Image: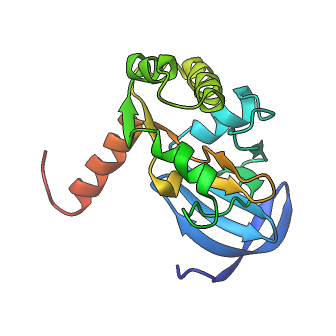
Amino acid sequence: MKYGTLRKIEIDGTKIDAEYIGRGMFCRAYRVESTVYLLCTGDYSKECVALFCDTSLRHIPTIKRHETWGDYHVYSMPFYAKLTKAKYPVAWRMWRTLPPSLLGFDKANELIDSEKIPKSIRIALRNLVDAYANYASDSMLLEFNRANVGVEEKSGSLILRDCLADISSINKIRKEQRKKRGLHD
């Protein structure tokens, strides 16, 4: 599907026109004004944040869970701006203190205990990691690439928009994709 394409999606029983703005491994994203709707399959990181995270923390995204639609788990969040060095220098500097990725609770805890990253980010990460522990996944992956973060435009706060993932779910998808292409492990 092309970016900017309008499509009808169903949110809590109501069909709405939404603009396609992208996809990840587990979700397709649609925008309606200042709200982004995520149609997800195979990953529960959005559910984890929606149900177990303290969204009053500065760097945690506000995610709301909606009724399922077919095979999709549906979530919404505010539209967060793209992180750029020129427009959001403070958020950029905070983001640059984070490693590209971390695998597992032990590595995440090392980062949280580190004085190398700002305290407000450490508090948010502690909240994310503790929330993800509800899913008892030792294959927790934290990814901090620029596509996975955003900025709350009014405050300029860095938002850890899509930093949680389960590496076992990722590996399962990749294995299925390799199989479809005729590649073997």
On screen, residue 6 above or below 152: below
Is 126 or 17 nearer to us in this picture?
Answer: 126
- The number of callouts visible is 0
Quadrant that contains the C terminus? top left
Is 53 or 150 nearer to us in this picture?
Answer: 150
Is 24 or 172 nearer to us in this picture?
Answer: 24
How has the structure been colored for display? rainbow
**Residue pictured at 57% horizontal, 25% vertical:** 132
Residue 47 at least partly seen:
yes
Residue 8 image point, x, y percent? 74, 74
Residue 149 image point, x, y percent? 57, 51
Residue 142 image point, x, y percent? 45, 36
Residue 156 image point, x, y percent? 72, 54
On screen, residue 134 above or below 151: above
**Residue pictured at 53% horizontal, 48% vertical:** 93
Q: Which of the 4 image quarters holds residue 59?
A: top right
| Side of 53 relative to 107 (left or right) | right
**Residue pictured at 83% horizontal, 69% vertical:** 15
Is 21 or 59 nearer to us in this picture?
Answer: 59
Q: Which of the 4 image quarters holds residue 177?
A: bottom left
On screen, residue 128 above or below 81: above
| Side of 158 relative to 78 (left or right) | left
